[in-house]
C-alpha cells in the first residue's frame, strides 16, 4: 500500500504514521529523515543538499525528488510506504506524480488527518518538556511534581518555544496556506481520505484502518 500522509502540527501524524507502518508492514518515509540520511551517507544528492543547507538555502525540488526516488527504489519500499512531509506545493505534487508513474508505483492513497484548530492549540500549549532528557509531558501528568518522572531531574520542566500559542498559530497558518492548494490538486485526480484526528490514539488508528479497508 502506498500512502501520502498529511496532517497539521500537533494532530498526531507522526504517532499514526508509526502505527500504520507497524500494522501494514511498510516503512514510514519522513522526507526530513531521508534527507538527513542522504547527507550522513554522503550520497551525491546528499552532498549537494548539504552544500546548499550550509549556506542557509532551501533544498530545491529536483534534489528532493532525486532523494525520494532513491529511497522508493530501496527493497524496504517494495510492498509500499508512508510518505510524510512531501509534497508541500502543487509543483512538488506534479513532480511526485511523474516519479510514481516512472517507477510504476500506481494506486497511491492520500490520507489527511484533520483536527479543530483551537483544540490543537489547547493540546500543544498544555505540553511541557524536561530540560535534561527532553521527554514531553502533558501538564496534568506532572501537576504538583518538581521532578521529572522520566529521568528524575529536579525543576527541569519548561515550555518549548514551538509550543507557545503565537508560534503554533503561525505554524498552523503556514500549513493551511501551503497544504490547501496541494489537497485541491489531489482532490481533482484522486480520492482524498479525511480522518478525524481527535480521540484516543487507538481510536484514530482504527478510523484510518477502516477508511483504508
Image: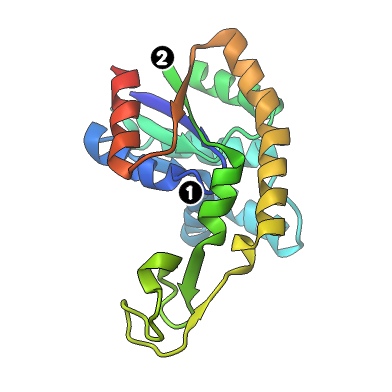
Q: Residue at x 71, y 42 (%)?
A: 173
195 w.r.t. 171: above or below: above
- Report the quarter where the C terminus lies: top left
Q: Label 1's element?
A: helix
Q: Which residue is mark 1?
A: 34
Which residue is at the front of the view, 160 or 94? 160
Q: Position of residue 113 (x, y in %)?
A: 48, 33
- Which circle's residue, 2 or 1, is located before the other in the chain? 1
Which residue is at the front of the view, 71 or 194? 194
Mark nearer the viewer, 2 or 1: 2
Describe residue 28's horizontal placement relative to residue 38 as left or right.
left
Q: Position of residue 212 (x, y in %)?
A: 33, 20
Which residue is at the front of the view, 81 or 188? 188
Describe residue 210's horizontal placement relative to residue 63 as left or right.
left
Describe residue 19's horizontal placement relative to residue 13 as left or right.
left
Q: Alpha-carbon neighbours of circle 1 within 10 Å: few (<14), some, or many (≥20)? A: some
Q: Residue at x 56, y 19 (%)?
A: 97
Q: Is residue 82 visible?
A: yes
> What number of labels is visible?
2
Direction front: furthest residue: 144
36 w.r.t. 65: above or below: below
Q: Alpha-carbon neighbours of circle 2 within 10 Å: few (<14), some, or many (≥20)? A: few
Q: Which picture quadrant has residue 2? A: top left
- Report the quarter where the N terminus lies: top left
Q: Position of residue 167 (x, y in %)?
A: 69, 57
Q: Which picture quadrant has residue 98? A: top right
Q: Label 2's element?
A: loop
Q: Which residue is mark 2?
A: 107
Q: Position of residue 62 (x, y in %)?
A: 66, 36
Q: Residue at x 66, y 40 (%)?
A: 175
Amino acid at each position: 500500500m502506498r500512502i501520502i500522509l498529511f496532517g497539521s502540527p500537533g494532530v498526531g501524524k507522526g504517532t499514526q504514521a508509526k502505527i500504520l507502518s507497524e500494522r501494514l508492514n511498510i516503512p514510514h518515509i519522513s522526507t526530513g529523515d531521508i534527507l538527513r540520511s542522504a547527507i550522513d551517507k554522503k550520497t551525491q544528492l546528499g552532498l549537494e543538499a548539504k552544500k546548499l543547507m550550509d549556506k542557509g538555502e532551501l533544498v530545491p525540488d529536483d534534489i528532493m525528488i532525486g532523494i525520494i526516488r532513491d529511497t522508493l527504489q530501496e527493497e524496504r519500499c517494495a510492498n509500499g510506504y508512508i510518505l510524510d512531509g512531501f509534497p508541500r506545493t502543487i509543483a512538488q505534487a506534479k513532480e511526485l506524480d511523474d516519479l510514481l508513474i516512472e517507477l510504476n508505483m500506481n494506486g497511491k492513497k492520500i490520507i489527511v488527518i484533520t483536527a479543530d484548530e483551537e483544540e490543537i492549540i489547547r493540546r500543544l500549549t498544555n505540553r511541557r518538556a524536561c530540560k535534561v532528557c527532553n521527554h514531553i509531558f502533558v501538564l496534568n501528568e506532572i501537576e504538583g511534581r518538581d521532578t521529572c518522572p522520566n529521568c528524575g531531574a529536579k525543576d527541569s520542566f519548561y515550555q518549548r518555544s514551538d509550543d507557545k500559542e503565537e508560534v503554533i498559530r503561525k505554524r498552523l497558518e503556514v500549513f493551511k496556506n501551503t497544504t490547501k492548494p496541494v489537497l485541491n490538486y489531489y482532490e481533482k485526480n484522486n480520492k482524498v481520505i479525511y480522518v478525524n484526528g481527535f480521540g484516543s490514539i487507538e481510536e484514530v488508528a482504527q478510523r484510518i484502518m477502516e477508511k483504508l479497508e
